Amino acid sequence: MAEWSRRINLTAAHTPAERVHLLVAKVLPAVELLEPGTVLDVGSGNGSPGLVMALLRDDLEVTLLEPRTRRWAFLREAARRSGPGRVQVLRGRHDTYTGAPARTVSLRALALPLGDLAPLVAPGGRVVILGGRPHLEGPFEAEGDAGPGPGDIHVFRRLTADVSRGTPGGD
């Protein structure tokens, strides 16, 4: 992180202690909320929360999705250094993702409507949002908030059936 931050703006944290506090400590409560399986981290940027989740949980298959070239390059190198097969890094936006829906979709500091994330989340899966407060829309229900401070982490469950239309997994 320190090496890459000199070339591209990955975080405002400059010391190792600041980086651990901002990028790792604030993610720890979210790591405990994850169910085993696939995680798609949207707008991965500096690797928090997706890369941190992958490094802390062996039962997760994490895909980092980042559209910006230099941050994507950083993530590829960080994933390579974390060990083989631990993390997949893709260059693209959430609305261009063509992979299978994930058990969990995570994002941090992005203002995306929940409805835009619905195609990325498997029915019954979750969206875990660090920071911000999205408007509840689409086939989701709020599961609650967590974290060290109020409003730090928000969890939404994707409904297995669209209640309004009565279709399985519909949105």
Image (spheres, helix red, strand yellow):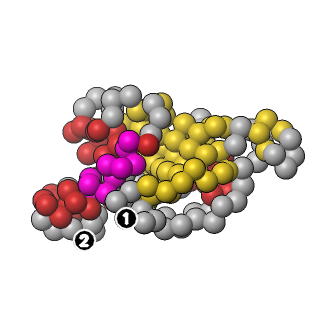
Taken as a whole, is the magenta stretch helix, strand or loop? helix
Of residues 140 and 97, the one nearer the viewer is 140
Q: Does residue 118 appear left or right of residue 171 in this picture?
A: left
Q: Position of residue 86 (x, y in %)?
A: 33, 32
Expressed as whole percent of the image width and height from the top left, the position of residue 171 reads 76, 48
The outermost residue toward the bottom is: 12
Label 1 residue SS: loop
The magenta segment is 23-32
Classify residue 81 by image quadrant.
top left
| Residue lying at 72% horizontally and 55% vertically, measured from the top left | 138
**Does 127 sit above or below residue 81?**
below
- Place of residue 41 in the rendered image (x, y in percent of width and height, measured from the top left): 45, 48
Name the residue that disc number 1 marks: 149
Q: Amino acid at mark 2?
A: Ala
Residue on which disc 2 sits? 12
* Relative side of 117 to 54, left or right: right
| Whether residue 42 is visible | no
Callout 1, which amino acid? Gly
Dots 2, 1 in contact, CB < 8 A = no
